[in-house]
Every structure is written in C-alpha cells, then in structure tokens.
Image: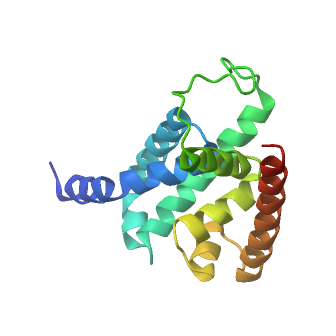
Amino acid sequence: MNSRDEEFGEFMRNRASPLHQSAYLLCGDWHLAHDLVQDTLAKAYLHWPRVRQADSQDAYVRRILLNEARGRWRRRERTAAVSRFPEGREPVAPDATDEITRRAGLLQALQSLPLRQRATIVLRYLEGMSERETAGVLGCSEGTVKSQSARALGTLRNYLDRTESTL
C-alpha cells in the first residue's frame, strides 16, 4: 500500500461516519445516503492530490457530497421511483416515545425543504459550521447562507406548527 492510499484511508476512516449522517439528513434514506457517501469517497480518492491541498479537506469533500446529492435529486426528478412505499406505509418498527416522534417530524420537515436550503440547515445547524464555512462548501456568499437559513427555518417552523396542530 502506498502513502497516498494510507493517507486517504485514514481520512476516510475519520470522515465516513459524519459524511453518512450528513448524507442521510440531505436525502432521508439510509441506503441512498450510503450510495452518496460511496460515490463521494470514490471521487475524493480520484482527486486526492487536490483534496489534500485544499484549505479544508472536509469542505472539499462535503462539496462533492452536495454535488452528488444535487445530481441524484435532478436524476430522480426525471425518472420514476422504482420501489417506493405508499405515503406513510414505509415499514418501521413502532416506537411511541416522544423523542422519536419529534425526530421523525423534524426529518420529514427537513425533507420538505428545497435541496439548497436543506444543505444550508444541515451544514449550519447540524454540522455546526460557521456562515463562512457553509458559504465555502456551498460555493455562495455569506449573505446567501443567511437568507437561505432564514427561509429554511421559517419553512421548518411553519411545517412543524402545522403538523403539531394536527396531532
């Protein structure tokens, strides 16, 4: 094994789990999230010299992840879903705890956002990135991050208020 492979392997071991979490929050499906991370890490490996030299390797790889998610989102809009369960009928293990119910509601609300707003929320509030770091990953200005965050948070608030009032 050469030093490039060892270096990338170390990076991958340290970042795979957080990338899976981000991918899941972006797409809401563990299987798709796994595919997104695999594709992301494959591209990161192919471009490892550039990734390694980046100011922030994490930001570079998260940008690849977001581009992969965006590409999947676009392809999905043009193709029919192969095996989707009817709304509300996905097989789940029932659990009546309030925390799981809130998490499910939050995930559903997050999935209702446009991809760019969802990515902003995931990076800013769930990954804990600063506005500057988020702007760097998304390739936009800090002002855009602020406006996307405000819109997304407003949409999430409205969505959660509507769903809580129906319970």
Image point (18%, 58%), residue name: 3
Residue furthest out toward the top:
83
Q: Is residue 161 left or right of residue 61?
A: right
Up/down of 3 relative to 53, above or below: above
Image quarter in which the C terminus is found: top right
> 87 above or below 29?
above
148 to 132, vertically: above or below: above
At a point 82% along the width and 67% down the height, the residue shown is 151
Measured as percent of width and height from the top left, residue 22 is found at: 52, 54
Q: Is residue 14 left or right of residue 109?
A: left
Q: Position of residue 67 (x, y in %)?
A: 62, 52
Q: Is residue 68 visible?
A: no
Tell me the residue at 38%/51% (across/down). Answer: 17
Give the total number of marks visible in the rendering.
Answer: 0
- Rendering quarter of residue 82: top right
Q: Position of residue 34 (x, y in %)?
A: 47, 38
| Foreground pick, 72 / 104 | 104
Point out residue 111 in the picture as x, y percentages from the top left corner: 71, 47
Classify 160 as above or below 132: above
Of residue 119 and residue 85, the one placed in the foreground of this image is 85
- Colour treatment of the image: rainbow
Q: Is residue 108 visible?
A: yes
Residue for point 39% across, 72% down = 53
